[in-house]
Amino acid sequence: MEYTPGKKGKALIVAVRCQGKGEIKVTVPSVHVTFPLTCVEGEASTTYNQVAVKGAERGGTVSIEAPSTIRWSLTIGRGTPAETETPRST
């Protein structure tokens, strides 16, 4: 999925929701970020990742590799960088 450039100083926010047993891999090539997510059968969970590194204001793409047994959705946005980065899952 492609995203457009944002304002300098804003963080790139990538939220992934998944359901199904297994692991997915999320890649954001423009900022050299890759992270795995473990998905659970019968439970939908959302993980938010905030990227506040040099170059996060540029446009780019996010890709997801997932087995066909996992249902997933992706939301990409921009926001004020958090002072401390704490992973959240709901």
Image: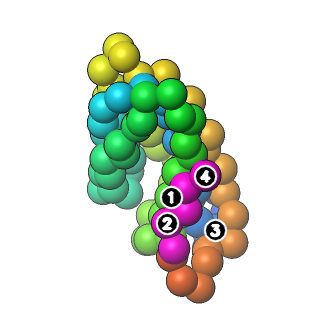
Please report whichever mark, 4 or 1, sits nearer to the chain's N-terminal start. Answer: 1
Reading the image, the residue beneath label 1 is 49
Look at the picture and state if 57 lies above or below 73: below
Determine the residue positioned at 66% across, 57% down. 78
Reading the image, the residue beneath label 4 is 90
**Secondary element at image label 3:** loop
Q: Which residues are magenta?
A: 86-90
Residue 32: horizontal and vertical position, in percent?
Answer: 30, 56
In this view, the mark in front (4 or 1): 4
In the picture, measured across the screen, residue 77 lies left or right of residue 25, that is right
Residue 27: horizontal and vertical position, in percent?
Answer: 34, 43
Name the foreground residue: 48 vs 39: 39
Residue at the extreme front: 42
**Secondary element at image label 1:** strand
Please report whichever mark, 1 or 2, sits nearer to the chain's N-terminal start. Answer: 1
Query: At label 3, which amino acid type do we have?
Result: Lys
Label annotation for residue 87: 2
Residue at the extreme top: 68
Look at the picture and state if 6 lies above or below 46: below
In the picture, measured across the screen, residue 62 lies left or right of residue 34, that is right
Name the foreground residue: 77 vs 39: 39
Query: At label 2, which amino acid type do we have?
Result: Pro
Check whether the beta carbons of the residues at disc 1 and disc 2 lie within 8 A of each other: yes
In this view, the mark in front (1 or 2): 2
Q: How far separated are the C-alphas under marks 1 and 2?
A: 7 Å
In this view, the mark in front (3 or 2): 2
Label annotation for residue 10: 3
Check whether the beta carbons of the residues at disc 4 and disc 2 lie within 8 A of each other: no
Q: How far separated are the C-alphas under marks 4 and 3?
A: 24 Å
Check whether the beta carbons of the residues at disc 4 and disc 1 lie within 8 A of each other: no
Residue 75: horizontal and vertical position, in percent?
Answer: 62, 40
Among the 4 quarters of the image, the one containing residue 84:
bottom right
